[in-house]
Image (cartoon, rainbow, N blue to C red):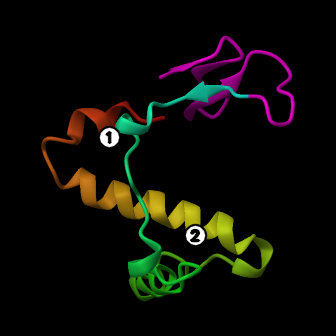
Amino acid sequence: GCFTNSVRINFNELGLRGLCANRAISKGEIIASIPYAAALPVGNTMLDGYHGELLMEEFKNDGVLDEIDLRNYNADDVYDALQGLKFLRETMQNPEWKPYVDSLP
């Protein structure tokens, strides 16, 4: 898998690292590809609830969502973000994953 020449990993004016566009990106344009065998599962709808209700409850109980008005966001987007946060929480505790997690933008 790799990024196309349309994007690069860089820092923004606030010093945050992330994926930045080198040019205008068209809707539906592929900017990165990851072989299926290399993809990391971050969510399990059977364990998280059909729309992430159980995962959402876990983070509400942890206080993660205290200052966020979820009515301002699409539920699927919130669920995706929480899946990523759960993945990071779990992998950051595993020394084998540290190099990978540290490399993330």
Looking at the picture, how far across and down is residue 58, in whole percent?
41, 83
Left or right: 13 as drawn, with respect to 3: right
Q: How crowded is mark 1: few (under 14 residues within 10 Å), some or many (20 or more)?
A: some
Rendered position, 97 above or below 99:
below
- Tell which of 29 and 24 is nearer to you: 29
Name the amino acid, label 1: Val
Q: Residue drawn at (78%, 29%), measured in percent from left and top?
A: 29
Q: Distance between the residues labelled 1 and 2?
A: 20 Å
Residue that sits furthest to the front in the current view = 36
In this view, 77 is above or below 11 = below
Give the class, few, some or many, for how many residues have Cα within 10 Å of label 2's Cα (few <14, many ≥20). some
> Residue 80: which quarter of the image?
bottom right
Q: Position of residue 30 (x, y in %)?
A: 70, 28
Residue under numbered circle 2: 79
Q: What residue is shown at x 79% (from left), y 74% (from top)?
A: 72
Return the mark for residue 101: 1
Residue 21 in magenta?
yes
Task: Please state the extent of the stretch shown in magenta in the rendering.
Answer: 1-29
The amino acid type found where label 2 is placed reads: Tyr
Q: Which residue lies furthest to the left in this view?
A: 95
7 vs 15, nearest the viewer: 7
Left or right of residue 88: residue 96:
left
Q: Report whether 22 appears left or right of 56.
A: right
Question: Image height check: is 47 above or below 38?
Answer: below
Q: Residue 24 carries which label?
A: none
Front tag of 1 and 2: 2
Residue 35, magenta (yes or no)? no
Name the residue rendered at 26%, 60% in the picture. Answer: 90
Kindly indicate the quadrant of the structure image that contains residue 47. Answer: bottom left
